[in-house]
Image (cartoon, rainbow, N blue to C red):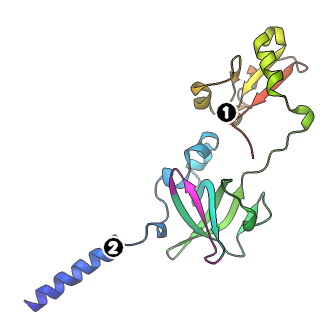
């Protein structure tokens, strides 16, 4: 009888250990836990890339030498080392929420350790190439023919379908080279692009 109780207790203890294994210790198995939908809109190649996370930088723990990455409402904890390379920002300390990042990692025991962190680069558009919203509104009111312009929505097609600036055409940025025939033949005509924002 005592043997039976001991065996039952041991089995129950093993079940508890199995259930309480920390979730962050496991490498993410499904795409929605590895890559945020926002990133997938433009970066279809992430679907086949191994050992990466893509989402928004949430926070950094200096003491634990780790960062948190927000992915579709969930969080992934990733450790970093002095050997972790960082691109588009000076170092890990320079990461600020909610900057989009891609993390290349390797599994070390129960930890995900970053080998490379790639931050979304800042886009700098020369001042003379920027257009005021008032000027755009004036042109849209005239229409493309009278206003002499082509307005391009470079966001993903699904975003264009949800809503867009009147008179704009959809040419998603990743498909720009394949859809360039939709651009005007006259290279001197006014070409206006807009997207979902930039860093």
Residue at mark 2: 18
In this rendering, the answer to whether 31 lies above or below 193 is: below
**Earlier-in-chain disc, 2 versus 1:** 2
Q: What's the distance in space between the residues labelled 2 and 1, CA to CA?
A: 44 Å
In front of the other: 68 or 81: 68
Q: Residue furthest top?
A: 146
- Label 2 environment density (alpha carbons within 10 Å; few <14, some 14–19, many ≥20): few
Asked whether the beta carbons under mark 2 and mark 1 sit within 8 Å of each other, the answer is no
Task: Determine the residue positioned at 23% across, 78% down.
Answer: 12
Task: Give percent across and percent down for residue 54.
Answer: 60, 54
Residue corresponding to mark 1: 155
Residue 143 visible in the snapshot: no
User: Who is closer to the viewer here, 131 or 100?
Assistant: 131
Q: Residue at x 28, y 78 (%)?
A: 14
Q: x and y percent of residue 24 in the render?
A: 48, 67
Quadrant assignment for the N terminus = bottom left
Q: Which residues are magenta?
A: 63-74
Locate residue 177: give its quadrant. Answer: top right
Q: Is residue 138 magenta?
A: no
Q: Is residue 16 above or below residue 92?
A: below
């Amino acid at each position: 009888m005592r043997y039976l109780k001991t065996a039952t207790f041991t089995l129950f203890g093993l079940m508890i250990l199995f259930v309480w294994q920390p979730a962050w210790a496991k490498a993410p198995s499904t795409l929605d836990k590895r890559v945020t939908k926002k990133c997938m809109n433009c970066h279809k190649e992430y679907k086949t890339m191994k050992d990466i996370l893509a989402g928004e930088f949430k926070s950094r723990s200096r003491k634990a030498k780790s960062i948190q990455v927000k992915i579709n409402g969930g969080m992934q904890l990733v450790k970093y080392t002095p050997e972790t390379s960082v691109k588009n920002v000076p170092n890990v300390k320079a990461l600020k929420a909610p900057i989009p990042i891609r993390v290349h990692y390797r599994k070390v025991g129960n930890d995900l350790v970053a080998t490379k962190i790639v931050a979304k680069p800042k886009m700098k558009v020369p001042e003379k190439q920027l257009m005021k919203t008032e000027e755009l509104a004036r042109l849209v009111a005239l229409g493309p023919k009278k206003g002499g312009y082509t307005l391009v929505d470079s966001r993903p097609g699904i975003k264009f379908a949800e809503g867009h600036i009147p008179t704009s055409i959809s040419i998603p940025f990743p498909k720009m080279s394949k859809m360039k025939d939709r651009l005007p033949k006259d290279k001197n005509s006014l070409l206006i692009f807009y997207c979902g924002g930039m860093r």
